């Protein structure tokens, strides 16, 4: 009976991990279109991660249309010894960059969404669709941040446990206007246009809801099963004691 309870606990934990969403690394541009000579930025977002201890992300940009000018940390994880972290890898070139940060202070762990770093880019071509691609990505998270012994869980783009969303910049001719956000009139509430839904966003939302529902059902069923088995075990133990008392008499 004890072995069965242990097995059920393992199944419960495995089911919970299986139903969780993988973290995502995404490139988000400051604007969807630009002219030759414009300076734009690209933020490297981390989403859906929990108890992050280290992040390592590399990107490449279209060498014919974009040139990297600068890269700055985004605040998702600290990057200096004084802040409780260090940088094991850093590379910055005109058409690719990569930055890795790892914590030394567990109180600085990151969860949820944030910008890992921001890249400043110059548009160098007259007209094109310029891709920005996540070439490398890896996250390390604490299995239990409060445990004395360090145990890390790895999420990697290479093994499919980490999602990546790339970006594209539309470089338009100099005589073609780029639509700017509507100006806010003083005294009127600020409004923003409703963005067009991205392809597959509705399906992804439905999938997330299905995963959450499945997780809740799985946990509820396993908890009920464990409670039933505990009750049965206690009943059998009392019955066994009753039979022993009868024999002694």
Image (cartoon, rainbow, N blue to C red):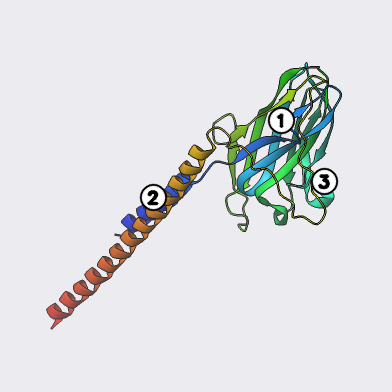
Depth order, front residue of 22/138:
22
The image shows residue 218 at horizontal and vertical percentages of: 38, 52
At horizontal 29% and vertical 64% (from top left) the residue drawn is 228
The correct choice, above or below, for 18 with respect to 165 in the image is below
Judging by the rendered image, the residue that carries numbered circle 2 is 11
Whole-percent x, y for residue 10 in the image: 41, 51
Q: Between marks 3 and 2, how big is the CA–CA gap?
A: 40 Å
Is 143 positioned to the left or the right of 43 in the image?
A: left
* Cβ atoms at labels 1 and 3 below 8 Å apart: no
**Mark 1 / mark 2, whichever is N-terminal:** 2
Image coordinates of residue 29 in percent, x first then y, are 73, 34
Is 2 on the left-hand or right-hand side of 50? Answer: left
Say if 74 sits above or below 2 in the image: above
Query: Nearer the viewer's eye, disc 1 or disc 3?
Result: 1
Q: Is residue 65 above or below residue 186?
A: above
Of labels 1 and 2, the one closer to you: 1
Q: For the residues labelled 3 and 2, say whether their Cβ atoms are less than 8 Å apart.
A: no
Dot 2, how many residues are within 10 Å of its Cα: few (below 14), some (14-19), or many (20+)?
Answer: some
Location of the C terminus (image quadrant): bottom left
| Real-space CA distance between mark 1 and mark 2, rounded to the nearest whole angstrom | 36 Å
Nearer to the camera, 142 or 217: 217
**Residue at x 83% of width, y 19% of height:** 124
Check residue 209 in the rendering and tell me which mark sits there, or answer none: none
Residue at mark 1: 58
Pointer 1 local density, CA inside 10 Å: few below 14, some 14–19, many at least 20: some
Give the residue number, with chain letter if any, for mark 3.
Answer: 80
Q: Quadrant of the N terminus?
A: bottom left
**Mark 3 residue element:** loop
- At 35% from the left and 56% from the top, the residue drawn is 222
* Residue found at x 31% / y 55%: 4
């Amino acid at each position: 009976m004890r072995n069965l309870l242990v097995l059920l606990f393992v199944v419960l934990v495995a089911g919970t991990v299986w139903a969780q969403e993988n973290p995502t690394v995404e490139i988000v541009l400051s604007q969807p279109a630009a002219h030759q000579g414009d300076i734009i930025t690209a933020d490297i977002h981390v989403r859906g991660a929990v108890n992050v201890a280290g992040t390592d992300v590399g990107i490449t940009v279209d060498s014919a249309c974009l040139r990297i000018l600068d890269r700055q940390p985004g605040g998702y994880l600290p990057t200096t010894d004084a802040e409780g972290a260090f940088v094991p890898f850093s590379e910055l070139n005109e058409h690719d960059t990569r930055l890795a940060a790892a914590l030394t202070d567990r109180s600085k762990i990151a969860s949820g969404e944030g910008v890992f770093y921001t890249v400043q880019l110059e548009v160098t071509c007259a007209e094109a669709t310029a891709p920005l691609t996540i070439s490398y990505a890896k996250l390390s998270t604490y299995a239990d941040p409060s445990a004395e012994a360090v145990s890390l869980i790895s999420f990697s783009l290479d093994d499919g446990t980490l999602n990546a969303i790339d970006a594209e910049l539309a470089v338009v001719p100099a005589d073609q206007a780029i639509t700017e956000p509507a100006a806010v009139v003083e005294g009127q509430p600020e409004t923003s246009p409703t963005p067009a839904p991205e392809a597959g966003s509705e399906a992804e939302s439905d999938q997330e809801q299905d995963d959450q529902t499945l997780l809740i059902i799985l946990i509820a069923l396993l908890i009920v099963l464990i409670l039933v088995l505990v009750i049965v075990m206690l009943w059998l133990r009392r019955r066994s004691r009753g039979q022993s008392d009868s024999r002694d008499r």
